[in-house]
Image (cartoon, helix red, strand yellow):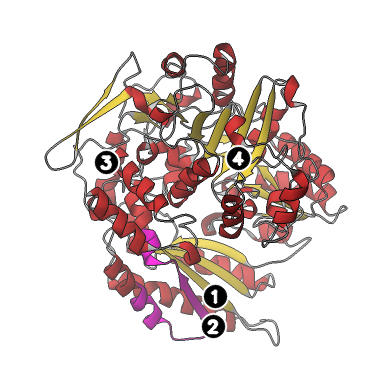
Amino acid sequence: MDTNRLEKLMLSVQKPGRYSGGEINSVIKDKSKVDVRFAFCFPDTYEIGMSHLGMKILYSQFNARDDIWCERVFAPWVDFEEVMRQNDIPLFALESRDSIKDFDIIGFTLQYELSYTNVLNMLDLAGIPLKSADRKGLAPLVVAGGPCACNPEPLADFIDLFFLGEGEEVDLEVIDLYKKYGKNGDKQAFLREAAQIPGVYVPSLYDIEYNDDKTIKAITPKDNAPKVIQKRIIRDMNSVHYPDKFVVPYIEIVHDRAVQEIFRGCIRGCRFCQAGFIYRPVREKSPDVINKQAKAICDNTGYDEISLSSLSTSDYSQLEPLLNDMLDWSQKDNVSLSLPSLRVDNFSKELLDKINHVRKSGLTFAPEAGTQRLRDVINKNVTEEEIMRTCRMAFEGGYTSVKLYFMLGLPTETDEDLKGIAELGQKIVNEFYAMPNKPKGKSVNVSISVSTFVPKPFTPFEFEPQIDIEEMRRRQSVIRDSVTTRKVSVSWHESKVSFLEGVFARGDRRLGSVIETAVKKGCRFDGWDECFHLDKWIEAFNECGIEPEFFANRKREFDEILPWDHLDYGVSKTFLINENKTAYAAITTPNCKERCSNCGAACFKGGICVEKR
């Protein structure tokens, strides 16, 4: 590729830093001296992809091996895509600026369903046939992983193989198998052997039959493929690879700070939360390892803020000793500690004091529902008293801004539950002004963010219907009309976007034709309001003879074969059914520290699952 010509074209678009590469800590290798070139593709903008911890981990791990060169690839924004197509510039990797069609393996991370059109569009920009069946040679091999791989069926026609679960070990096993076959190896033989690697799903090795009512009749493996594919997890978090440095971007990204992972999994079991189930069981890093890794990252990047990453940071069993150790050097280096994903039921004054040491920002909590009844239905296990206590503590500590996350459209939800969201916001405002020693001249702001519930695979609510767009908007208006003060602000996600997410979250491989048709109509960046066009999607559904409501708005029976029933993420279907029934009784289930509920995920600590889905 003509570098001078490319750089001149970059200057004609917004944010050329998205495409320039050359950042501090990026890895450059001699391509003639490596055996495998891996294009790590994030199907969204540079600013979002560069904020993703999984990409940082695998980029570092792959490049730690002399025989692999991993490079980064992001979806070009619409302005640069137009320039690329007009000037016949194929999709390229940032480090070498080589076209990814010449790489050995092209890997996509699937973080959200509305990135699926970008996956296909990126392949098209690279000049690579979209469908796996049309790519006859072994190279480039197109693979994918990430949380959306727990239901990979909508992309089954396009991806050669999927990684289920955590990738640090299984990714390298597949790369080593690729080395055995070589760039010119037999693709079908490779896929058959790859399917025998635990955690690898090869969709072309499974036939799907359908009933007359459009539900799935059978999922049948062939060519000796396993009947059930079990996810992979990392058992020892202390020994698994973690970067000692990150690539430092030249432009501002969404989460422009260092990140330190402290544990994986979640003890809570909120019935709507996919991540809380698919990443089970909980596995913690030791405080010593976390502290050393965190300091190394800050030293090697220059970041003055580090975020402790997990699904529920305040559930880390040794959080206060860890913060004490980290404060020894972070205060001296003027590094701020950020603790996202805090819970109101274990938030303490001691914790508040520690996170106040360097920099003070607004606090964020997620009650998820406006009434105690509905919080019990979803197994949030948080009381209004705990919410008020935590907000009072924050106000006494000098905070005047609180952000709360809620959902609408949850199973059994009523208008009273929706009104409860606004009422809870008002109670928090009242709590601030009732303080005897409130800060003079200060006012409080309670920011409420409401997202629409999307039923997800491998949760107790995977069987539930999603409310339709008209009902989403009605319920949004109920919340809006219930707010009576300017001290409480409310925002929500676009209902049409939530509907499409609901379609693909529980869709099957028949949706592949819809995605391909939508891409031809110009759909891409569907998670961005300015790029989302529901009318084009409806046209694509109609042309393909697919009713999107069948996937989004239909209740599933417990005995129905679901598109992901041949994939094992450790949590049994029997457990999910029981939790669904318990939800309708508004009965909570204790968290994993209080009592084991026999979900099935404990098998990953060193045994084999007795109970399968």
- Residue 578: numbered disc: 3
Could you say whether the residue bearing mark 2 is in a helix, strand or loop?
A: loop
- Residue 106: numbered disc: none
Number of the front mark, 4 or 2: 4
Span colored in magenta: 476-498
Q: Mark 1 points at which residue?
A: 446
Q: In this view, does 219 lie to the left or right of 20?
A: left
Q: Name the residue under label 2.
A: 487
Q: Residue at x 51, y 79 (%)?
A: 488
Q: Earlier in the sequence, mark 4 or mark 2?
A: 4
Residues 161 and 135: in front is 135
Number of the front mark, 4 or 1: 4
- Residue 374, x across and y down, in percent: 33, 61
Q: Name the residue under label 4.
A: 54
The three-letter code of the residue at mark 4 reads: Gly
Alpha carbon of mark 4 to alpha carbon of mark 2: how far?
A: 38 Å
> Do callouts 2 and 1 mark residues in contact (Cβ within 8 Å)?
yes
